[in-house]
Amino acid sequence: MSSHSRLHGSGSYRVPWMFDEDETDPQSAVAVTRTFARFKNRLAPYLVAAGDEAHRTGTPIMRPMLLEFPDDPSVPHLDRQYMLGADLLVAPVFTAEGDVELYLPEGTWAGLRTGERVDGGRWVRERHGFDSLPLYVRPGGVVPLSAHEDRADADHLDGLTLVVNPGAPGWSRTVRVRGLDGAPVAFSVRRDDDGLVVESALADGWSVQVAGGTSAGAVDGTARVAL
């Protein structure tokens, strides 16, 4: 859950298959590495957008909580969690037992991989295995996910899914995803009285999913999901 991922050591060979390669064990070193490598490939359009923002504004891809929530008095000292881009909260696991204690600012957060919705403004305790960690979409967050988990340089617009944790009625925002030609395509996301609406100049081949809820494909550049 960062801009760069590497496996290397100083004067030693450190790769997951040096530890174990049990294909029947979903928590073997190779299986866990594969799980997160594939998931990070799906995150590529989100990470590219965060990199664009870092280039334009100097705002880092990995951000201390204080940078995104400067008015929350509980966040200045937090050093065991961070924001990956503007919309994803990451809390690494530092205990052998898998216990994690993290703070969620105000609002309703949604687990990106689990879909679980959790009220913020409080501390949360969780337990995770080697193949998971706390990864939450902030209130009003939109995370574009690629359909291609085999490589990061695929066409991110092909089968794109926008995972949305919508704000209150009247909330809106625009996200941009770059295609193979490097040109950004805009997706306007808003919540009205009937639900969630996403519009784009891209007619089809993409969909929207409410985090932890239903999804809908685009028809003539528009996708709608009831809330």
Image (tube, rainbow, N blue to C red):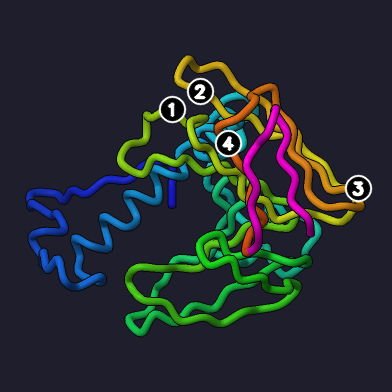
- The tag earlier along the polypeptide, 4 or 3, is 3
| Bounds of the magenta segment | 213-227
- Between label 4 and label 2, give the one nearer the viewer: 4
| Residue tagged 1 | 155
Q: Position of residue 85 (x, y in %)?
A: 58, 45
Q: Measuring 36% from the left and 76% from the top, which residue is drawn there?
A: 129
* Quarter of the view holding residue 139: bottom right
Picture residue at 42% right of the left edge, 77% below the top: 128
Question: Which of the two labelled residues, at mark 2 and mark 1, occupies the earlier sequence position?
Answer: 1
Residue holding disc 4 = 206
Disc 1 versus disc 4: distance between alpha carbons? Answer: 12 Å
Q: What element carries label 2?
A: loop
Per the image, the residue denoted by label 3 is: 170
State yes or no: residue 216 in magenta. yes
Element assignment for label 3: loop
Q: What residue type is labelled 3?
A: Gly
Of callouts 1 and 4, which one flags the residue occurring earlier in the amino acid sequence? 1
Image label count: 4
Determine the CA span between mark 2 and mark 3.
29 Å
Q: State the residue position of label 2.
A: 179
184 left or right of 194? left
Q: Position of residue 69 (x, y in %)?
A: 73, 56
Mark 2 and mark 1 in contact? Answer it, CB < 8 Å. Answer: yes
Residue 80 in view here:
no
- Real-space Cα separation, disc 4 to disc 3, in angstroms: 23 Å
Kind of residue at badge 2:
Gly
Instruction: Give the number of the mark in front: 1 or 4.
Output: 4
Q: Where is residue 56 in the image (x, y as percent from the top left)?
A: 62, 24
Residue 94's spot in the image, x, y percent?
Answer: 39, 73
